[in-house]
Image: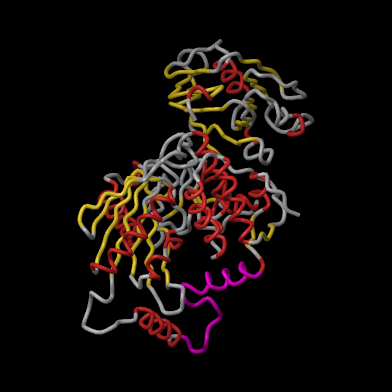
Amino acid sequence: MSAAASALELRDVVLSVGPPGAERVLLRGADLRVGEGEKVLLSGLDLEARTSLTALLDGRMPPRYGTVSAGPVRSGRLGRVSPSRTTTVLDAGDRPGPAGEADLPCADDPGCVLVLAGSAWSGLSVPGRYRSLRLDGGQFVEVEPAGAPGEPVRVPLAELQARTVEALLAAGIGHEAAEAAGEVLVDAERRGHRSHGIALLPTYLRRIKEGGIRAEARPRLTEVTPAVAAIDADGGIGQVAAGMAAEWCASRAATHGLAAVAVHGNNHVGMLAAYRRPFQERQVAGLLLNTSGPSIAAPGAARPTLGSNAICLVTPTAEGEPFCVDLATGVVAAGKIRDAANRGVPVPPGWLQDASGAATTDPRELDRDGSIPLFGDYKGLCVTLLAEILAGALAGHRVSPDVGKQRKHLDRVMNCSQLFVGFSPRHLGPPGEPSLGGFVRRLREAVLAGHPAEPPRPWFPDQREEDHAALADARGAEVPRSVLDELGWGFS
């Protein structure tokens, strides 16, 4: 989003309130952008914070540092408000009461609206209308709507794909790029990983609107050697450059035995296993690695300083689907925690720490500077450092502490990076025609042989995905109603 399209904008604002000697720092280098016609609910504000922020926005209180651009501002208490083309700032009080969500300005109000609210409002939103933010540690942090989202809805995969493409096209993404992104998101839904599915689309759409995903981007591939390439993703929707990397890597590895592609300047790419098909088609093994913004706490740490980096191995088989090992280095993918927030349920113990480092089961704490522990203690740290060095330092010349968080910095390209490496079994190992799928079957039999009797599924990594895919093909994917509501997609 350009500055001209922002009705209200704060950049690097520092604001102190209170008497000299007992000052309270309310904003610590905070950024906020509210576009024309956009509606935002900002919670986590006590009375002093609401009063001071209103004075900052209407020009009565200058910031200690940074810039404020708001234009004409009208302010008042939450209640029935007539439409206006100016910026409206409303005090909602400490908690929802007689004047609640029904009293928020209507969706067709042409002006931008900022509703200032206490902590008890955190996460409340009007689906499809209001973006929900919280003031936390002097920063504005996006949070998921809380409350009972209703029963999930099964949606046919073809309809999910069509609606996703339609939404991306309406946001300004080109048709080919929209199709590519839609296929990756829907594939994640099909395989039972809704953490990487349609729930990401509202964030993608906000990032496109704010400029963090460049709708006009054109990824550029540079061949360094016949088997090595680099792709500048140009800050576009991440699936385009990742798909280009998979195709080139698999094709060149089939010809030369080995190939590698580094992708830099990219955004979120979704589930890495979604890029498996070029490797399966050419019977090439693929090692795919990705860096992400900080959400992981190192062993014993309280703060998130490393990315929940992803590692995926694609092994071709003769059955039509390759065998994939795809994992994030946290004890759980961040998207699974946000999925719990979308469904209004707690996360299991051990999945999440709050901003102080204490264990919590509230999924909303992730976007309040919470963190996910690494799996496997220091062995997990070693695994995530493999991705940091190979996909981060080597492929992108930056590591996860330098990567933007897509929900927190909507107007900035994440600048994450990926490394795709392809291995042709025809060129490696002893002479003959090796079948990697055959060795996967041998390993499957070995795992099964370790049980006294045949165990219940899943007892091998690909079985959960197989079962989910079969159910989704027959009945559609199960999508939380809160996600459908946020997208404005009506389903009974």
Which range is magenta?
Answer: 451-474
Give the residue displayed 63% in from the left and 43% down from the top. Answer: 145
Q: Is residue 54 left or right of residue 390?
A: right
**Quarter residue 99 falls in:** top right
**Any magenta on residue 50?**
no
Image coordinates for residue 98, horizontal then vertical, percent: 79, 30
Determine whether, in the image, residue 333 is placed left or right of residue 108.
Answer: left
Q: Position of residue 69 (x, y in %)?
A: 51, 18
**Residue 316 image point, x, y percent:** 38, 73
Q: Is residue 32 above or below residue 179?
A: above
Quarter of image, res 115:
top right
Is residue 455 covered in magenta? yes
Front-lying residue, 62 or 392: 392
Residue 334 screen position, x and y as percent: 49, 52
Query: Would you say 53 lies left or right of 425 here?
Result: right
Judging from the image, the colouring scheme is secondary structure
**Residue at the (63%, 49%) spot, across then down:** 483
Say if 21 sits above or below 430 in the image.
above
Residue extending furthest toward the right: 98
Quarter of the image that includes the C terminus: bottom right
Depth check: 134 or 400 in front?
A: 400
Say if 216 sits above or below 349 in the image.
above
Which image quadrant is residue 35 in? top right
